[in-house]
Each structure stands twice: as structure tokens, then as C-alpha cells.
């Protein structure tokens, strides 16, 4: 793994179990994990069963106006 200023190698030995990696498409040659996902995998958490919830993001004025117009048009259809 490349870590901005050099290569990083993770090594952890399991005594009785296996790491539960996320599902990857058939034929994939690599798996990309976020730092938080790697930490969970190393702690024994099955990340393939986790569900990400939407996070708050600030909406721009332009997109907000589009969203309001879309909601209004949907309300008129009902």
C-alpha cells in the first residue's frame, strides 16, 4: 500500500479465524478499503454486512432551487 511518503505493509496473524473482507466482483485483482474499514477488518468485524447511512452535506443554492422546483412539480402531479 502506498502511504503518501512510502510503502506501508500491514501484517497480522490470526490464531483461530479469518479476516472477513468485503465482497468483490469476480475477477477483481485487488480490494480497496478506507482506513476505518481496514481497522474494522483487523478488529474482526465483517465489513460486508455493514450499512452506510447517508451523511449530511450542505446543498448549494442552485441545487436547492432545483430540488424545490422538482418537489413542486411532483406535488402538482398528485
Image: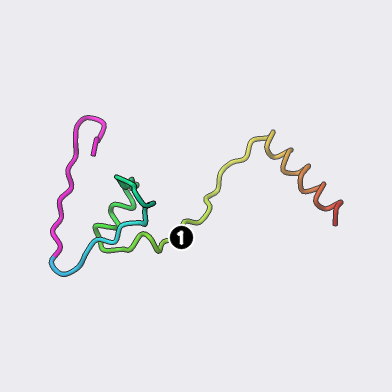
* Stretch in magenta: 1-14
Q: Residue furthest bottom?
A: 16
In this view, the residue in front, 18 or 29, is 29
Q: Quadrant of the C terminus?
A: bottom right
Look at 33% across and 63% down and name the residue there: 46
Crowding at mark 1 (Cα within 10 Å: few <14, some 14-19, many 20+): few
Q: Is residue 61 left or right of residue 55?
A: right
Q: Quadrant of the N terminus?
A: top left
Q: Residue furthest front?
A: 27
Q: Is residue 74 magenta?
A: no
Label 1 sits on a secondary structure element that is loop
Q: Is residue 5 magenta?
A: yes
* Residue 18 location, quadrant: bottom left
Q: Taking 26 as reference, is 7 above or below it?
A: above
The residue that label 1 is drawn on is: 51
Q: How is the image coloured?
A: rainbow
In this view, the residue in front, 67 or 18, is 18
Mostly what secondary structure, the magenta segment?
A: loop
* Residue 61 location, quadrant: top right
In this view, the residue in front, 40 or 18, is 18
- Counting every numbered tag in the picture gives 1
Q: Taking 17 as reference, is 28 above or below it?
A: above
Q: Position of residue 28 (x, y in %)?
A: 34, 47
Q: Position of residue 2 (x, y in %)?
A: 24, 35
Look at 31% across and 63% down and name the residue there: 45
Q: Position of residue 33 (x, y in %)?
A: 33, 48
Look at 75% across and 44% down and name the residue there: 68
In this view, the residue in front, 52 or 56, is 52
Q: Position of residue 30 (x, y in %)?
A: 30, 45
Amino acid at each position: 500500500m502506498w502511504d503518501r511518503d512510502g510503502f506501508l505493509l500491514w501484517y497480522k496473524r490470526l490464531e483461530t479465524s479469518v479476516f472477513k473482507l468485503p465482497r468483490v466482483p469476480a475477477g477483481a485483482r485487488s480490494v480497496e478499503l478506507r482506513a476505518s474499514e481496514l481497522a474494522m477488518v483487523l478488529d474482526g468485524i465483517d465489513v460486508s454486512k455493514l450499512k452506510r447511512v447517508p451523511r449530511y452535506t450542505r446543498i448549494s443554492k442552485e441545487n436547492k432551487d432545483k430540488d424545490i422546483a422538482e418537489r413542486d412539480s411532483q406535488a402538482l402531479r398528485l
